[in-house]
Image (cartoon, rainbow, N blue to C red):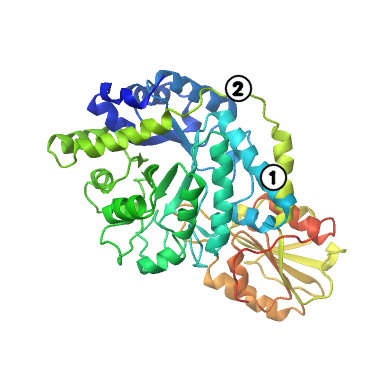
């Protein structure tokens, strides 16, 4: 069994490999050559893997295999903000964090019980496939409505709301034996720049950060979060270096002022925000990070760090400090999980939460229900990839896309706008030309309805519409949930957790 007092027997190279979480492509694990490369990293002592994609049985089997190969237990991480189904086929995809906060009334004990059931279901599925380090919760306070990379990944634009939901996630995940991870410190919510593409600059004072963005992280520390991810964010009031390379941010503020003694890991080192910065891994370790997430080449990274250690550019004490903190967390990791998961029940739970999240933002029209679809004209807008096979198509007779020539005649236009949040995409909304086109069509209509399947912030551009509805996601499940409400099978129960200034 691994214990903290055994750390002295590991050579420098293995200690440095422990400081890295490398990429694992789940879709490639059946390829012999790819398996060999991953197994070699495990034998060298890699700290862990972040898994993208794959299928349930294959993933579980391969993770068990590499865990047995590794002398030190592996961190198996994954971005599963929307449940394991976000990454792994055959598991459950749950609603995004903003939909969850729209669905759950914190003052209602029954709602809180549903939230706890949901987090437990997510945790059970993570353990079932071998994930022990889910990169959740997102604790960014989404203050910028044009934020291209956080948006619906956030619980809210209110620090207190984000703090409450974040703490609930952390308590349940840690109680299930998982390593929760709060991200993206010190807060990626108040910027319109995606750090996958460019370095976001946050022009806030430290006092302003303390009053808003840092509040959820302070509460996460109190709740017992095991790890915190540092964002690639520039805050000139604090340091000329990005947060992930800043000793002021990691050591002085996060460690000393906020009192966090858990694992500090960087956001992915392959992100373009770090382009044109030299010696990034070394600078991150010097700043106080324990784990380097997703470097382009882990072997090259280790060689660079060995060279830095030999030339005294990084102290053995700093490496030892990070290594011991990693081992301390790993001593508490559970072994192989063997229990049955009721995936069908989890799917039902996911659908229930989605149903409860649909939010009626505005209604100046007397009647919401749509009893006769032949009198409605559905107009699809936004990302065509998201609505090409939309289940809405089975309900409506008259359907157009926003780029078509459109005549309503005597029909009631319903605009369905599809958006999503994704790395390197650069936007969570729709183009100015599409906004103007929708506004022109709204003016032509006697009455109209706009439904956002994705970012609720797009609704603020269509104040002239009589009915505005937020569904937070473009999934088939979210679209079916809206139809249940429009047909009167479900009530509009969701409470939008952000301000739209309508």
Q: Name the element at disc 2.
A: loop
Calculate the distance from the C-alpha at mark 1 to the C-alpha at mark 2: 23 Å
Residue 85 lies in quadrant: top right
Residue at (33, 61) in percent of width and height: 234
Q: Nearer the viewer, residue 431 or 117?
A: 117
Is residue 428 shown above or below 409?
Answer: above
Residue 21 lies in quadrant: top left
Residue 55 visible here: no
**Quarter of the image with the C terminus in it:** bottom right
Task: Tell me: 145 left or right of 257.
Answer: right
Q: Position of residue 263 (x, y in %)?
A: 39, 41
Residue at (74, 48) in percent of width and height: 352
Q: Name the residue under label 2.
A: 338
Count of numbered circles in the view: 2
> Is disc 1 surrounded by few (<14), some (14 to 19) or many (20+) residues within 10 Å?
many
**Quarter of the image with the N terminus in it:** top left
**Which disc number belongs to residue 199?**
none
Q: Which of 492 and 120 is in front in this view?
A: 120
> Is disc 2 surrounded by few (<14), some (14 to 19) or many (20+) residues within 10 Å?
few
Q: Name the element at disc 1.
A: helix
Q: Residue furthest right?
A: 371
Q: Which of 445 and 118 is in front in this view?
A: 118
**Which disc number belongs to residue 350?**
1
Q: Residue furthest left?
A: 311
Q: Which of marks 1 and 2 is in front?
A: 2
Is residue 68 shown above or below 95?
Answer: above
Is residue 356 shown above or below 430?
Answer: above
Residue at (37, 20) in percent of width and height: 71
Task: Tell me: 415 left or right of 370.
Answer: left
Q: Where is residue 272 in the image (x, y as percent from the top left)?
A: 34, 52
Task: Tell me: 310 left or right of 368.
Answer: left
The earlier-in-sequence mark between 1 and 2 is 2
């Amino acid at each position: 069994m691994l214990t903290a007092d055994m750390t002295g027997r590991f050579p420098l190279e293995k200690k440095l490999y422990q400081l890295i979480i490398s990429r694992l492509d789940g879709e490639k694990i059946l390829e012999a050559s790819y398996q060999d490369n991953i197994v070699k990293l495990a034998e060298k002592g890699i700290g862990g893997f972040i898994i993208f994609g794959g299928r349930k049985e294959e993933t579980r089997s391969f993770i068990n295999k590499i865990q047995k190969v590794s002398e030190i237990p592996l961190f198996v991480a994954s971005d599963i903000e929307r449940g394991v189904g976000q990454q792994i086929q055959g598991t459950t995809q749950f609603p995004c964090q903003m939909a969850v906060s729209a669905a759950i009334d914190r003052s209602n004990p029954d709602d809180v019980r549903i939230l706890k059931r949901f987090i437990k279901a997510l945790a059970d599925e993570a353990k079932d496939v071998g994930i022990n380090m889910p990169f959740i919760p997102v604790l960014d306070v989404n203050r910028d409505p044009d934020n291209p990379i956080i948006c619906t990944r956030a619980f809210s634009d209110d620090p207190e709301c984000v703090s409450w939901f974040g703490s609930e996630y952390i308590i349940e995940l840690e109680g299930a034996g998982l390593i929760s991870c709060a991200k993206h410190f010190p807060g990626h919510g108040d910027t319109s720049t995606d750090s996958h593409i460019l370095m976001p600059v946050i022009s806030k004072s430290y006092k302003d950060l303390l009053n808003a963005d840092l509040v959820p992280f302070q509460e996460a520390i109190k709740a017992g979060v095991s790890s915190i991810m540092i964002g690639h964010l520039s805050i000139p009031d604090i340091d000329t270096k990005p947060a992930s390379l800043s000793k002021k941010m990691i050591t002085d503020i996060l460690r000393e002022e906020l009192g966090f003694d858990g694992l500090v890991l960087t956001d992915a080192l392959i992100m373009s925000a770090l382009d044109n910065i030299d010696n990034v891994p070394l600078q991150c370790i010097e700043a106080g990070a324990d784990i380097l997430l997703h470097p382009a080449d882990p072997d090259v990274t280790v060689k660079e760090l060995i060279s830095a250690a030999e030339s005294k550019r990084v102290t053995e004490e700093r490496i030892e400090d990070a290594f011991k903190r990693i081992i301390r967390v790993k001593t508490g990791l559970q072994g192989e999980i063997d229990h049955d998961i009721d995936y069908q029940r989890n799917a039902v739970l996911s659908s229930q939460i989605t149903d409860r999240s649909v939010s009626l933002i505005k209604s100046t029209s007397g009647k919401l229900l749509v009893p006769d679809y032949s009198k409605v004209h559905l107009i699809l807008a936004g990302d065509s990839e998201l609505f090409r096979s939309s289940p809405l198509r089975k309900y409506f007779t008259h359907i157009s896309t926003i780029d078509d020539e459109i005549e309503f005649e005597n029909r009631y236009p319903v605009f369905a706008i599809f958006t999503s949040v994704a790395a390197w995409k650069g936007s969570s909304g729709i183009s100015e030309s599409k906004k103007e086109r929708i506004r022109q069509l709204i003016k032509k209509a006697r009455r109209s309805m706009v439904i956002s399947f994705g970012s609720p912030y797009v609704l603020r551009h269509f104040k002239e519409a009589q009915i505005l509805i937020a569904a937070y996601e473009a999934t088939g499940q979210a679209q079916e949930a809206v139809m249940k409400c429009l047909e009167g099978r479900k009530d509009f129960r969701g409470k939008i957790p952000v301000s739209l200034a309508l």
